[in-house]
Image (cartoon, helix red, strand yellow):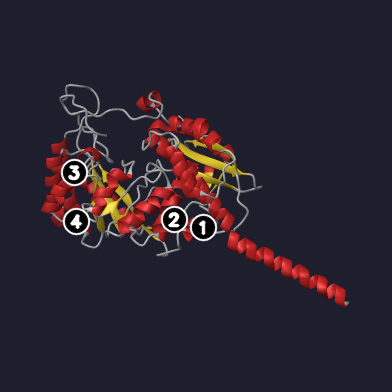
Amino acid sequence: MKRRTLLGAGLAAAATAASQIARATRGLPSPKIKDVSVIATAPEGLRLTVVKITTDQDGLYGYGCGTFTQRAELVNLAVERYLRPFLAGKPADRIDDLWQAMYDSSYWRNGPVLNNAISGVDQALWDIKGRMANMPVYQLLGGKHREAVDCYTHADGSEIPQVIDNARRFMAQGFRHVRCQIGIPGMAGYGSSRGDVKVDALHSGPVFEPNFYFRRAVKMLEECRTQLGDEVELLHDAHERLPPILAIQFAKAVEPIRLFFLEDVLSPEDIAYFRNIRQQCATPLAMGELFNSPHEWTPLVSERLIDFIRMHVTQMGGLTPARKAAAFAEQFGVRTAWHGPGDVSPVGHAANVALDLACYNFGIQEYSHFGDRTREVFSGMPEMKNGYLYANEAPGWGIEIDEKAAAKFPFGYGESGERKQMNGGWGEIRRRDGTIIKQ
Ligand code: CO
C-alpha cells in the first residue's frame, strides 16, 4: 500500500472516531416534533386515548397514554386543538422542559382532562427517547431493581364462596396477591355484582348503603383469611364510599386480617382523616387514584399517613411527574402501587411496568388482563406469568399499534344503555332515600 493511501485511511478512521465521540458525548441529533395526533379506540368497550408523536426523523415516533375514559373526547380535543399547535417544531428530546411548558401553557391547570392530554404527549416523548437510545424506558430510568413486576388481580363475587373460589383460581395461576370484593344483595357494590335481590328505595336507580357494605365486606375478608390461609396477600378497595367515621371503624375492624393494603378507604375530599386512622390502627393504607396534583399526595407522604401511593399515572400528567412522586415517596418509606385498571391503554400499563422495575420503593402493581381485541390493536405489551408482569425488552415502551385495527373499534364500540347515551360517561348511584353517593 502506498504511503498516501495509508495516510488517507488513517484520516478516515480518525474522522469516524471523532464522529462517534461526538455522538456519544453530545447525543443523537435533536429530533423536532412534526405532528401530534390521537388514536381513539375502544377494543374492549372502554375508550382508550393514545397520543402519537411523529418527528422530522424518518421512522422516529412514539406513543403515550392519555386515557380518561369517562370524558375521552375532551382529552382528544385538548391534544388536537391546543397541544398539537403548541408543540409543532419543538425539540422532542427535552421531555421535562416540554412538560413544564405544556403544564403552564393553559394557566389554569391540574385538571384531569389537561393532565391526561399532557400525559399522552409526555409518555410519547419517553417512547421516542427510548427508541433513540435503542433501550427500553426502564433503562433510561436507571435500570432494573427486580426481574419482573409482582401483581395483584381482582377476585369478586355476589356471595362469599364465589369470592373465595375466584381467589383460589388466581392463586392456582400463581398470583401471590389478590384483591377481594363482595356484592351486596340488591345494591351496586364496587367490583362485584348485586345478585337478584331487589332493595326498597325511593327511586328506581342503583342503590348503595355504606353500613350494608361495611358489615358484608368485613365478614367476607375475615372468611377469606380463614379459608385461604395466612400466606396469600389480601387486598381490598373501599372505593371512597365510606363516611370518615365509618372509614376509621373499617380500618380498625380489618386490622386483625392483616391486609396487604386497604385502598381508598377515604375519598379525596376527606383525606385529612388519614391522621385519625393512623392514630388508631396499623392497617396498611393505599390512596391516590383520583389525585391530580402534588398538593394531594405530598402531605400524605411527608407526614407518613399512607403506605402506598397509587395514582393513575396519566391522571397526574404522565411518567415525568410519576417518577418524581416515586422518588419523593422513597424518602419516606412509602411504596408505589400505580393504578392499573382496564381503562388504561397497554401503553399506560407499559409505563407502569417501567416505573415498577426501575423504582426501589415499588410495592405492588394492579393487573388487568389484555383481551384478544386489545391484542389485535396493540402488540408488545408486558406479559403475565405466574402473577408477574415481564417488560418487553424492545426500545421505548416496546409497543406498536395497528391503526387500521384500532379504527375497527371506534369510541362507543360495545357500549349500551346509559353508558352509550352518556357518551362513555358514568351514571349515578344513590342511597335508598335518593341521596347521591360517590361512585
Ligand atoms: Co380503587
Q: Secondary structure at mark 3?
A: helix
- Between discs 3 and 4, the one toward the N terminus: 4
Q: Which residue is mark 4?
A: 225
Residue at image position (21%, 53%) is 303
Q: Position of residue 66 (x, y in %)?
A: 45, 40
Q: Are marks 2 and 1 in contact (CB under 8 Å)?
A: yes
Q: Position of residue 206 (x, y in %)?
A: 24, 28
Asked if residue 346 shows in the view, the reply is no
Amino acid beneath label 4: Arg
Q: Is residue 152 left or right of residue 248?
A: right
**Disc 3 residue crowd, few under 14, some 14–19, many 20+, Cα 10 Å:** some
Closest to the observer, 361 or 364: 361
* In the image, the residue with mark 2 has its CB under 8 Å from the nearest atom of ligand 1: no
Q: Which residue is mark 1?
A: 136
* In the image, the residue with mark 3 has its CB under 8 Å from the nearest atom of ligand 1: no
Amino acid beneath label 2: Ala
- Between discs 1 and 3, the one toward the N terminus: 1
> Residue 212's quadrant in the figure?
top left
Q: Position of residue 107 (x, y in %)?
A: 40, 34
Judged from this view, the residue extending furthest toward the right is 2
Q: Which residue is mark 2?
A: 354
Q: Which residue is mark 3?
A: 272
- Between discs 2 and 1, the one toward the N terminus: 1
